[in-house]
Amino acid sequence: MSRRPGLSARWKLTLSYAGFLTAAGVLLLAVVWVFLLRYVPDNSQGLLGISPNRYLLVRTFAPAAAVAMVFLLVFGLVGGWVLAGRMLAPLTRITTAARTAGNGSLSHRVRMEGRQDEFRELADAFDTMLEQVESHVAEQQRFAANASHELRTPLAISRTLLDVALRDPTRDRDALLERLQVVNTRAIDLTEALLLLSRSDRGNFIRESVDLSLVAEEAAETLLHLAEQRGITLDVTGGATRTRGSAELLLRMVTNLVQNAIVHNLPAGGTVTVHTEARHDASVLRVENTGGPVPPDVVPTLTEAFRRGTERVRTDEHAGAGLGLAIVQSVVRAHDGTLDLVPRPGGGLRVTVRLPDTR
């Protein structure tokens, strides 16, 4: 932004300090004149018949007062310049750090020492902001790199299949088309997941009243066939639980949770329980499943994009791209809620979503 040149903050503080000091000197001289010199007789006999009189005192006092005023002005300018420089030194460090960050170096920190005051509070807040920005930028860079890799994989497979078909015209065309369809479907699903993740991160959706219990039933009905194929018992319990948000995004959130609970379960005889309840301060959705033990140190990484926990990588048609729980977390965050993942003692995972209650 282009601005007209003006006085620096240091000069403004200096002039203010000198001006106040000079004004105090003038006020002091005025007090001397009003309460002292005005009572000195202005005649040849002076006060109590003794000279000097007011005329002589004024002539003697005026030059000394002028010298004192000049001294106060110079002292105010010099002292104000020094004091302003010391006071604004922390601000200069913060400005330098801001310019360094603006040039792309987000690792720089102010780290201002000393006791707590307004400038150090500003420096600490600035350091915290830089840490969050650096973390966000690093996360976005990892996400972009992983997304590029995930999208490149199906495209590379499609190109290989087409090259093989061109070199070998006698190859089974139906098998080729089937494999191309599978690869293309995976690429489309990944692209749609990325778009959904971007949309939920922006939070630009219309909010309406949504019953989580109905959303849970719809998601369970959609995935019932998958659960039956894998021998998983799927139960939906609880009563009406209302919140405000996007019905489409909340349905995708619940669907991802239920599908994740079905896919990462026991080979047979497992269970998935979806429960909704309205509490006094939140609408709660809880999804639990059986399965293998989940190490506690793996749990925090499950909501990262393109991250899969140990022994959670699938090779079948439900392999996914590692965006399921990342989308869930993004949707929950966009709805001002919280997401908790806790390993179950007997194996499996308990996922609890808390959203604002609209009752």
Image (cartoon, rainbow, N blue to C red):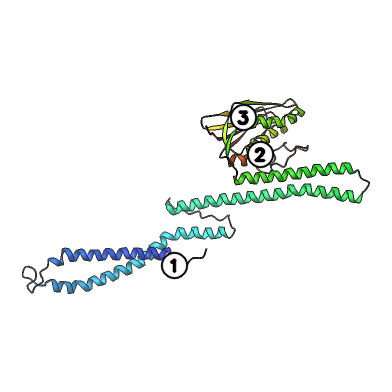
* Left or right placement of residue 134 versus residue 31 in this view: right
Q: Nearer the viewer, mark 3 or mark 2?
A: 3
Whether residue 107 sits left or right of residue 31 in the image: it is right
Q: Earlier in the sequence, mark 1 or mark 3?
A: 1
Determine contact: label 2, label 1, CB under 8 Å.
no
Q: Which residue is mark 3?
A: 213
Mark 3 or mark 2: which comes first in sequence?
3
Q: Is 17 left, or right, of 60 in this rendering?
A: right
Residue type at mark 2: give it: Leu
Residue holding disc 1 = 6
Asked if 142 appears above or below 34 in the picture, the reply is above
Which amino acid type is shown beneath numbered disc 1? Answer: Gly
Q: Position of residue 199 (x, y in %)?
A: 63, 45
User: Comparing marks 1 and 3, which lies closer to the viewer?
Assistant: 3
Residue 332, position in %: x, y? 60, 39
Q: Can residue 248 be seen in this snapshot?
A: yes
In the picture, the disc for residue 112 is none
* Residue density around tag 2, few if under 14, some if 14–19, many if 20 or more, within 10 Å: many
> Residue flagged by tag 3: what amino acid is it?
Ser
Question: Which residue is at 65% across, 44% downward?
Answer: 197
Q: Which residue is mark 2?
A: 325
SS state under label 1: loop
Q: Residue 242, how many percent across, how many down?
A: 57, 32
Which secondary structure, mark 2? helix
As measured in the structure, the alpha-carbon distance from the residue carrying label 1 to the one carrying label 3 is 62 Å
Q: Nearer the viewer, residue 93 or 321?
A: 321
Residue drawn at x 53%, y 50% is: 128
